[in-house]
Image: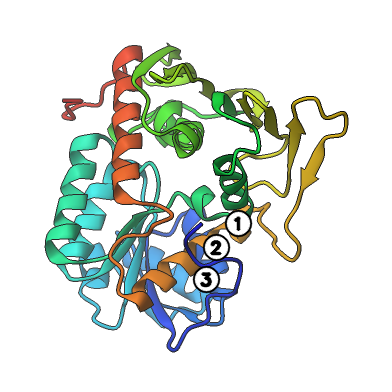
Amino acid sequence: MSGTGTGTGTGTRKIRWGILATGGIAATFTEALQSLPDAEVVAVGSRTEAGAKAFAERYGIPRAYGSWAELAADDEVDVVYVATPHSAHREAAALCLEAGRAVLCEKAFTINTREATELVELARSRGLFLMEAMWTYCNPLIRHMTGLIADGAIGDVLHVSAHFGFVGDFGPEHRMRDPRQGGGAVLDLGVYPVSFAQLVLGEPDTVQAVAHLTPEAVDDNTAIVLGWQSGAVAALSCTFTAETGAPAMISGTQGRIEIAGNFFCPDSFTVHGRGEQTPRTVRLADVHSDTERATMRHEAIEVMRCLRAGETESPLVPLDGSLAVMRTLDRIRERIGVRYAGVDLD
């Protein structure tokens, strides 16, 4: 498996980060960065100067900008973390790339494949680093799991199940229900199980889905079935109406792997070998991966490794893989009838 392993990521120089947006996930990622000795958060940008200054004061960040453009223009920023709602990802990330900044962009990568393709083409044309913040792919335990699967630990994988659901008390004005902000369960929550299934099996050949839609015409409870020509299938779900938790199982011809906790940042998984009476629980010593902040550390380490190595794409979170996930998310939304004003699925 490629990438950074489980170290701190310490290199020859500090990587200087800018934070674009000031919401909860930006706060968690900033805390993760500040726990790394070779990362330095030097600037934050928001749509308002007051918001940027408040965030900067909270985290001791030296520069606060009241616009995204000012942050993007800061030549002392090596890489910008884009933490806006996904409806603004293309605009924010493109602004930074056009200013010559490397970009780590939150998931879902964009609102649709067309926007994602535009970002990838822009980054590649300028020779700039771009990565989707699918931090699950950088989790050492998940990487160890995929290595075991590649080595045949459970035989040929033929079934994946993954679910992500909770009860969210979201009013009609909340971004999760707002089509103008790319609302709905699929882009916000479904990106995790879809990315998990495609990490193991690649892009599916067939996509089916059913969903319940809110009065605003976004999905709040969605079931997804993916199929591959190999005969493999995946049963996935995402919802903010029910407490499903976030379990996952990968089943093959010679056994299965179960993740009982949050599959996107697990602290262990259990291997059930075919014909074996005793299952084997796998943990990695000295690796703390079971929180968002801990897993974000590994993501940040991978970004900084790539920047120091002069790599414009991460082998752990390749851009072609992010595009493949976006194509699947588009197909799911097409099946359930969720469209956003002014955004074509074509």
Q: Which residue occupies the extreme bottom position in the image?
A: 12
The residue located at (31%, 78%) in the rendering is 77
Asked whether 128 or 281 is in front, the reply is 281
Q: Which residue is mark 3?
A: 33
SS state under label 2: helix
Asked whether 278 or 333 is in front, the reply is 278
Residue 174 seen anywhere in this rendered image of the structure:
no
Calculate the distance from the C-alpha at mark 3 to the C-alpha at mark 2: 10 Å
Q: How is the image coloured?
A: rainbow
Residue kind at label 3, given as amino acid type: Leu
Calculate the distance from the C-alpha at mark 3 to the C-alpha at mark 1: 17 Å
Q: Which residue is mark 1?
A: 140
What x and y, as percent, mark residue 23?
46, 54
What x and y, as percent, mark residue 256?
68, 29
Residue kind at label 2, given as amino acid type: His
The quadrant in which residue 49 appears is bottom left
The nearer-to-camera label among 3 and 1 is 1
Label 3 Cα crowd, 10 Å radius (few <14 / some 14-19 / many 20+)? many
Label 1 Cα crowd, 10 Å radius (few <14 / some 14-19 / many 20+)? many
Q: Which residue is mark 2?
A: 298
Q: Cβ–Cβ below 8 Å for labels 2 and 1?
A: yes
The answer to whether residue 181 is left or right of residue 213 is left
Residue kind at label 1, given as amino acid type: Pro
The residue located at (39%, 79%) in the rendering is 16
Task: Check the image and report above or below for 338 versus 168.
Answer: above
- Whichever of callouts 3 and 2 sits on the residue coming sooner in the sequence is 3
